[in-house]
Image: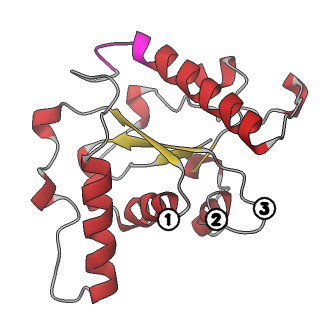
Amino acid sequence: EALYREGVDCFSGLHVPPGKNWKIYNLRIEGQNARAVVLIVIQTVELYSSNACLEEIHLAIKDNLTIIPVRFDKEEDLPKKCQQWPNNDKDSEQIQLMKNTVRDTLGSINSLPARGTVLSYPSALEQLAQQVKNLIRDNQRTSGVMENASADDQPSPPSNSFFSPGLFSAYDSFSIIV
């Protein structure tokens, strides 16, 4: 909701209609029509076991998107680097390299908020929205593109807020492309 209030056009896996291939989400990151500037990574315990999230973060790294990790679970509950996306004997070398790249990159980026979770610091969501808005503005300046989208051009937010604590469950982990 904070992103929508700031007029930030965003997309998450929650926008993919039932029955559609969730990988269309990746087209927002790479491909001929990709316009993504930021990938917001929702840090939960489940994130670090999701191969889909691993792939999305890796695509964002490859395409030089700004990545903003947003902590929803307590830091002490999140897996340590060596426990994130655990390797198994079936992993190809390419998959192992992807896991290492994502672990190293994500591990080197400060999370929002600096301490605790966004659930304990509600103002962190407003900070996030402002930071994303500034990144988009700066990106438009450097690319020479200034878009004038009206509020009518913005997609409707999903019926549940991205940030609603009740939205998360053991199988939920996702990221938001901006």
Against 67, residue 28 (above or below) is: below
Q: What type is the residue that disc 1 sits on?
A: Lys
Give above or below for 78 relative to 89: above
Extent of the magenta region? 119-124
| CB under 8 Å between discs 1 and 2 | yes
Q: Is residue 160 left or right of residue 49?
A: right
What is the spatial separation of the Cα atoms under label 3 and label 1, in whole angstroms? Answer: 16 Å
Residue in the foreground of this view, choosing between 119 and 126: 126
Residue topped by disc 1:
62
Side of 99 relative to 18 (left or right): left
Q: Secondary structure at mark 1?
A: helix
Q: Badge 2: few (under 14), some or many (20 or more) residues near its Cα, within 10 Å?
A: some
Nearest the viewer among 103 and 125 is 103
If the image is split into quadrants, where does the C terminus sit? top right
Please give the name of the residue rendered at 72% of the width and 58% of the height, measured from the top-left corner.
Answer: 34
Q: Earlier in the sequence, mark 1 or mark 2?
A: 2
Q: Main secondary structure of the magenta part?
A: loop
What is the x, y in percent for residue 151? 85, 23
In percent of width and height, residue 159 lies at: 64, 32
Task: Tell me if residue 121 is in the magenta stretch.
Answer: yes
From the viewer's perspective, is the residue at label 1 or at label 2 nearer? 1
Check residue 30 in the rendering and tell me which mark sits there, or answer none: 2
Mark 2: which secondary structure? loop
Residue 18 falls in which quadrant of the image?
A: bottom right
Measuring 34% from the left and 84% from the top, which residue is drawn there? 94
